[in-house]
Amino acid sequence: MGTTKVQVYVYELTNGMARAMSRSLLGIEVEGVWHTGIVAYNQEYFFGSHGISSVLPGGVIGQPTEIVDIGETEIPIELFEEFLLELANDRFHGTKYHLLEHNCNNFSNEVAQFLTGNPIPAKIVNLPSEVMKTPFGQMIRPFIESMMGQVNGMGQFQPHQQPSTLLSAQAPILPQPSTIPQLSNILQPPSIPQPLTIPQPSIIPQPSAAGSIAQPSSSSTPATSTTHSKSDAAPSDSSHHDFDLD
């Protein structure tokens, strides 16, 4: 019986920003924010809100940041895909996806252990729990939970006629950066209200020679504007600044 090499394709999703900014934000150093897929049988298997899918290695979001050799397996592909079918119809259905507690890395870890008996690197699996222990993590958790409440399964595992193509070969559509709520909008302080403008006092008609108030005539020439001193002018709006954080 032949063997098949099993690898973990590791993708760092922040292009180094997590390492650069994590200590100032979290108080701990985070190497990266990870996405993983299991590569075996010349396919890359991964999990997301769409369910379980497979593509050619490196066909999800480009070339991996790191490739980890997990081991080799003697399990035939037919048995492996039966295992995936069970997962896809139960614990790894798309509707069961959760960014923090049940994500692509949990799937990769379970599949790696099924094929080889070896887990994927602990730094990847344990990252969400480590981040959520920090004050910043506790602050943003409600936002993440509310966001996950809006995620619906995009599909369900559907067997194809050929055993080697049991999984959908189409990669999921990843959200564009413009559609992701910016953290700066979450942390931005409330806007400072503009000061109210005090209205100018009304012009009081001058008394006539007889001591009575002269009534304006509809045919009379409009009164000339009265010049006010600087002390009578309405206060100008004070400038203010919004503070943005990213």
Image (cartoon, rainbow, N blue to C red):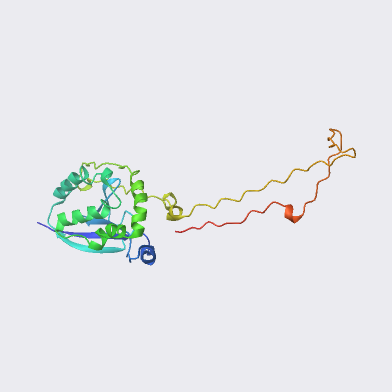
Image location of residue 153, percent across then percent down:
30, 42
Residue 208 vs 60, above or below: the answer is above
Give the tally of numbered discs. Answer: 0
Whether residue 138 is visible to the viewer of this picture, yes or no, is yes
Q: Write the residue at 62% across / 48% down.
A: 196
Residue found at the far left of this picture: 1
Q: Position of residue 47 (x, y in %)?
A: 26, 50
Q: Residue furthest top?
A: 218
Which of the two residues, 146 or 201, is positioned nearer the viewer here?
201
Residue 31: image location, x then y, percent: 32, 65
Vertically, is 35 above or below 82?
below
> Which residue occupies the extreme right position in the image?
209
Does residue 42 show up?
no
- The residue positioned 19% from the left and 46% from the top of the image is 87
Quadrant of the image for the C terminus? bottom left
For the N terminus, the image quarter is bottom left
Return the residue found at the far front.
211
Q: Which one is nearer the viewer's eye here, 170 or 194?
A: 194
**Residue nearer the viewer, 112 or 64:** 112
Q: Position of residue 190 (x, y in %)?
A: 49, 52
Position of residue 147 relative to residue 64, above or below, is above
Q: Quadrant of residue 75?
A: bottom left
Q: Quadrant of residue 20?
A: bottom left
